[in-house]
Amino acid sequence: MPIKEWDHIARSLALRPSHDANLIIHHPMLVWPFEGRDAVPDAAIAADLLHSAEPRAVRAGQLRLNKLLKDLRRGTGR
């Protein structure tokens, strides 16, 4: 999402900063690299999960990247 939309979205979801948060939002502050897209590509989300402190998130990222790579090698592009 473009940063200009963040305040509205955060308010609509009642999100607030916390030291013991169960949700972490990563957002590029200077440049939104996905301008003109309807959604962030799966590969970008999966790669971001690799940097998580939560082992389940890292594993999910690894599984998704492996699936994307397998599909790419097969030529399905999914």
Image (cartoon, helix red, strand yellow):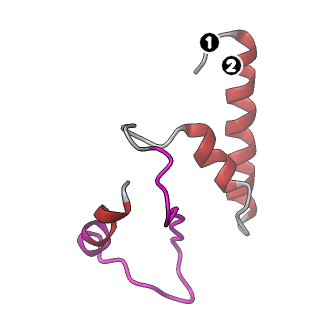
Say which residue appears at 72% left-offset and 39% top-offset.
63
Where is residue 61 drawn, in percent x and y? 69, 47
SS class, disc 2? helix
Q: Are marks 2 and 1 in contact (CB under 8 Å)?
A: yes
Rendered image quadrant of residue 65:
top right
Where is residue 32 drawn, in percent x and y? 46, 53
Instruction: Please report the bounds of the magenta region as a residue range.
Output: 8-34
List the residue tagged with mark 2. Answer: 71
Where is residue 49 drawn, in percent x and y? 66, 55
Image position of 78 (left or right of 9)? right
Position above or below: 54 against 39: below
Question: Which of the pair 21/10 is nearer the observer?
Answer: 10
Magenta stretch: includes residue 26: yes
Question: Which of the pair 37/17 is nearer the observer?
Answer: 37
Label 2: few (<14), some (14–19) or many (≥20) C-alpha neighbours in 10 Å: few
Circle 1: residue type? Thr
Where is residue 8 drawn, in percent x and y? 24, 69
Q: Of callouts 2 and 1, which one flags the residue occurring earlier in the amino acid sequence?
A: 2
Say which residue appears at 69% left-offset and 18% top-offset.
72
Image position of 2 (left or right of 46)? left
